[in-house]
Amino acid sequence: MYDRELVIAILDDHPMVLDGIQEIIRRNIANATVIGFQSIMQFNDFIRVKPVDLLLVDMFLSDGRGIDVCKEVKEKFPTVRVLGMSSALERSTIVELLQQGGSGFILKNTEASAILEAIEKVMCGEIILSPEADNLLNKSVDNPSPLPTLTRRERELLRYLVQGKTITEIADILLLSNSTIDTYFKYLLQKFKVSNTTELLTLVSRESIL
Amino acid sequence: MKKLLFQFILTILPLFAVYGQDTNTIDSLRSEFTAAKSDTAKLSLSNKLAREYFIRGDSISAFKYGYTSLALARKTKVRLYQAKGNQIMGYLHTILIHMDSAKYYNNQVIQILKDAKSTEEIRVVAYAKNNLAANYQVTGQLKKTAELLIENLPRFEKIKDNKLYQVTLENIAVTFNELEDFEKATFYLKKGIEFLNKNNFDAEHKIGNYLTGALITYGQGDLVLMKTYLDQVKSYLDEVGITSLYSGRYYAYLTWYYVKKKDLKKSRETLAQAEKSLKHLESRTNYYDFYNSQYEVAKLAGDHHGALKASQTLYEMAREDNRASIAARHAKDIALLASKLGDYKTAYTFQQRYSAISDSTKFENMEVEIHDLEISYQTAEKEKRIVLLENEQREATLKSKNQVLLNLVLGIGALTFLLVMLFLFYVLRTHKKNNKKRLEEIGRDQELKISQALLEGEDRERIRIARDLHDGIGGTLSGIKLKLSDPAADKELMVQKANEQLGAAIGELRRTARGMMPESLLKNGLETALHDLCADLISSEVQIEFQSSGLLADLSMNNTVHIYRIVQELLTNAIKHGKAKNILVQLIQEGDTILITVDDNGKGFDPAKMSNVTGIGLKNIQNRVDFLKGKLSIDSDPENGTSVNIEIYVR
């Protein structure tokens, strides 16, 4: 399958997962040496003396984050490919893993064939993501439009500002403290990337925001 | 060579001359004294007796009559006699070099007759001043001596006492000689001799004057003039005879002359004559003159032992008379002679004494000069200062008394104030304590309620999780088991189906686990966890936008979890019950305040008529907000969806 012998390291603090994945790889990849580690420390001791081709790493280990392991390995041994895995699906984790040079992410409930396929693709230099992870990455909590979305309270605040009311007057109407209204107001300026009320109101009227 | 110290003889001379005018015998004077009726007459006679006894060397009898005069002087109211009583004592002490007493009595005389008018009064004052000048001469205050003598000249002129006028000129000359102002010394000497020749003086007086001339010229080294003066003395002495009171001085001076001429034989002859003359007048000064002569002759003869003996005698005499400067000179001589004789011990001892005395003499002289000049001034100053100090002390005492009083008043005031303050503080504290206690009780009740509510909420949460597990994962797993246990089923298809269903079950489990406690919340913090939460909940049915600003990473775990749960609950409500298509989650932190807003465009509800399920969800949120001492406001209506605003204080 591979023209030379592969060294594959697996880092997972859960022994059953570790054994399961090791078994799958041993059975299916002929010229591969598979070594399992339960702690980051053990793995670090190994990689210092032996070259590793691929690291499969759990995202949440008992002695640290998989992302940090990925980052360190990539800094010291850039040729090592890192494939993250987790039973949890968190957008931020996947994003960060890829940012740190990880070659992909698979969910632990992925079938054996998918794991082997992922390893093969990663060794060819591809980025591989589980379908769920891929789906999650396509979900964005950010607003795609150029103008920011306003909360109901922000709209209310803007309306009063257009009417020429002061922060104190608005606070009195909304039965809130001055500092609360002020905080909302400052965030409005930040959202619209303007520096004062005049600019804010000009923008609001120009873009017909209200 | 300034060992010549005979000046003070001259001071005796005026007195001598005055009283010497009537040379009554002691016996006749004593009978006169006994017969005298008035105190003033008795005083005059006792004065004469004192002088006569003194000249004859009976100083004890002399002092006896001296004190008689003093006692009579104190009885009389006539100031002339009061003065005369003191005068005889001043005279006696002056000759005996009792300087303190001499100065005292002489000053008494001057004080009593300070505005002397009659000739007799002026005469007595003049004598006293003369004697005082002699006193200052002895103590080394020569400038003062000269001043007193020069000031005295008009007095003698006024009372037409030519003899004393002349003698004073002589004394002034000697004083300037001693001050080494030879020009002035010669001037006054020549003035004296001139006056002497113009007027008719008796032989003895002329002898005295020429002797003084000889002394001055000897001091100046003018041996020719000295011999002339001495020859003059000789001619007058021949008139008077060897019994003259001046013969001792004459032979002494003559000895010095021959020594200077290096005529040992003649000097020895004259020294023998000087020794003989001592019998005529055993005055202290004559002894000084004699021993000085002896010293000079011995030195000329190379007789160190003789010179040493004479020096030692002179040294002892000077010591007895408290004449420090003279003693110093002789100590120096003794040291020199002793070293020549190989007696180094004596030489050393006297060298030491010389140094000690000369140092102290210089010091003493300086002291005395300053002392006399400033004594009256200083006394006045001292008295002024004493008065000032007394005033200051009185003021200080008064001040300190006032201060003590003020301190006392202030102290009592402060103490009263302190007590009042303490009392008020106590009352206030007790009050505050009670209030605090009450508030604490209320707070505890409130917290207990909140905690209870939270616990109830958690129980409900557990119930929900149990239901999820039972209905969701449990159901799926049961389904798989059923399928696998069907013996008639196509094995391959069965495994494929079971595998799919297991995947779904694991997904379900993951979601349930997340619901319990998301891993990223613990490891990545609130903002990331909420971000992930929103992202995870996004689906084809619902779009969620997440906005955050200024969220700090140092939130406590407690606050983090509560805020996460609040947002999670609100999102669940919006999705499940509001069926919202768009949700906006916003978290803004400003200082210690976090503003949470979750807006949706769902169905909305009437807060007054909440459904039970929504109600339970909101109740959970309300409990958490209360627990965090925050504010919750819900704005919802069926057309615009729901807007929830929460304000939480995180510190």
Image: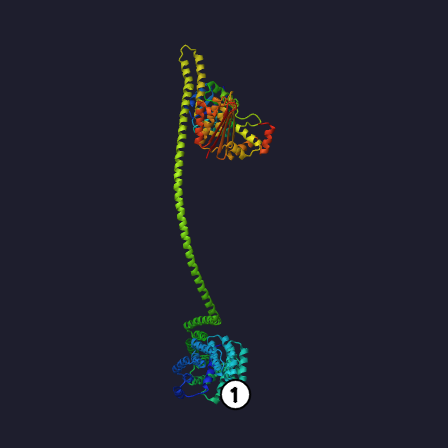
* Residue A45 seen: no
Residue occupying the far top of the picture: B488
Q: Position of residue B69 (x, y in %)?
A: 41, 81
Q: Which residue is mark 1?
A: B200
- Tell me how the rendering is colored: rainbow
Q: Between B166 and B494, which is closer to the camera in this rendering?
A: B166
Q: Position of residue B35 (x, y in %)?
A: 39, 87
Using a 10 Å C-alpha cutoff, classify the residue at mark 1 as few (fewer than 14 neighbours), some (14 to 19) or many (20 or more). Answer: few
Total numbered badges shown on the rendered structure: 1
Q: Between A182 and B485, which is closer to the camera in this rendering?
A: A182
Name above or below for residue B319 compared with residue A155. Answer: below
Residue occupying the far right of the picture: A206
Q: Position of residue B344 (x, y in %)?
A: 42, 72
Name above or below for residue A46 compared with residue B52. Answer: above
Name above or below for residue A86 compared with residue B19. Answer: above
Horizontal side of B611 relative to A164 (left or right) equals left
Residue at (44%, 61%) from the top-left corner?
B395
Locate residue A22: give its quadrant: top left
Q: Between B334 and B467, which is closer to the camera in this rendering?
A: B467
Secondary element under disc 1, as helix, strand or loop, is loop
Residue occupying the far bottom of the picture: B239
What amino acid is labelled 1 in the image? Asn
Chain at tag 1: B
Q: Position of residue B46 (x, y in %)?
A: 41, 84
* Residue B194 seen: yes
